[in-house]
Image (cartoon, rainbow, N blue to C red):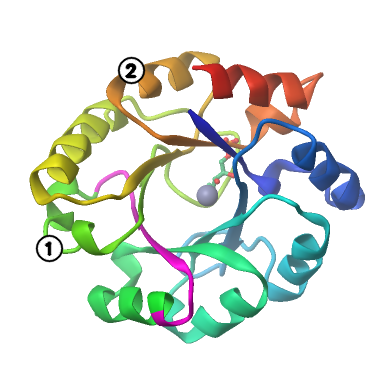
Amino acid sequence: MKVSPSLLSADFGHMARDIEMVNNSDAALLHIDVMDGVFVPNISFGFPVMKYVKQHSTKPLDVHLMIVEPQKFVNEVRDCGGEIMTVHYEACTHLNRVVQQIHAAGMKAGVALNPHTPVCLLRDIVADVELVLLMSVNPGFGGQKFIEGTLRKVKELRALIAETGSKAEIEIDGGVNEVTGKQLAEAGADIVVAGNYVFKAPQPTDAIALLHRL
Ligand code: DX5
Ligand code: ZN
């Protein structure tokens, strides 16, 4: 599977060192979690930090916006070097329009679902996006326990993607480790986000390599 290490679990006092580690690993992407304290009960970092991250990262930035009104920030994400911009289904009244804006800005569009939001709600958007991110924890914090029901959602999404002719990749975010990663690979996930499992490992590049081989 492709691996997208989540910078949220990095040591912010040694950000450049941790980005360098990801550069020298099997990671396909670098996952950037932006939180606003409104959509989720936590605040992480914003665009000034992302700009700095982009200068150091050789991996494409996989930007996960856990914010209300993400349509206001499409150009900022692009200007900060975002390659994929993922917005939450629950945060967008006019999701189709937001997806069009992301494409017009030259980025790939992703849509994220909270754990309680059913996959069937994506039926009329899934063919228009490059990525679907299924949250396997309630968004806002790293280091939480994987919600098992996500495995069924991956299978449902895989079927919906086949049925609609969508080219979207399936990314899973939250509680990924070697056990849940293997289950996700078997269920049909394409990309796993991993925060704590990677950055708290004694050898983070080995943890990335292990997930990559699943
Ligand atoms: C949670 C974030 C995740 C988080 C994952 O709201 O979207 O990307 O960093 O962290 P782990 O892998 O530790 O669950
Ligand atoms: Zn995330």
Q: Amino acid at mark 1?
A: Asp
- Please give the label number shown on residue 124: 1
Q: Is residue 173 above or below residue 131?
A: above
**Front one among 148 and 128:** 128
Q: Position of residue 122 (x, y in %)?
A: 18, 56
Q: Ligand 1 falls in which quarter?
A: top right
Q: Position of residue 41 (x, y in %)?
A: 52, 59
Secondary-structure class at tag 1: loop
Residue drawn at 75 percent across, 71 percent down: 51
Assess whether residue 111 is covered by the magenta stretch.
yes
**Front one among 128 and 40:** 128
Mark 2 and mark 1: Cα distance apart in space: 26 Å
Magenta-drawn segment: 104-116
Residue drawn at 25 percent across, 46 percent down: 116
Number of other residues with Cα within 10 Å of mark 1, as a class: few under 14, some 14 to 19, many 20 or more: few
Which residue in the structure is indicated by mark 2? 186
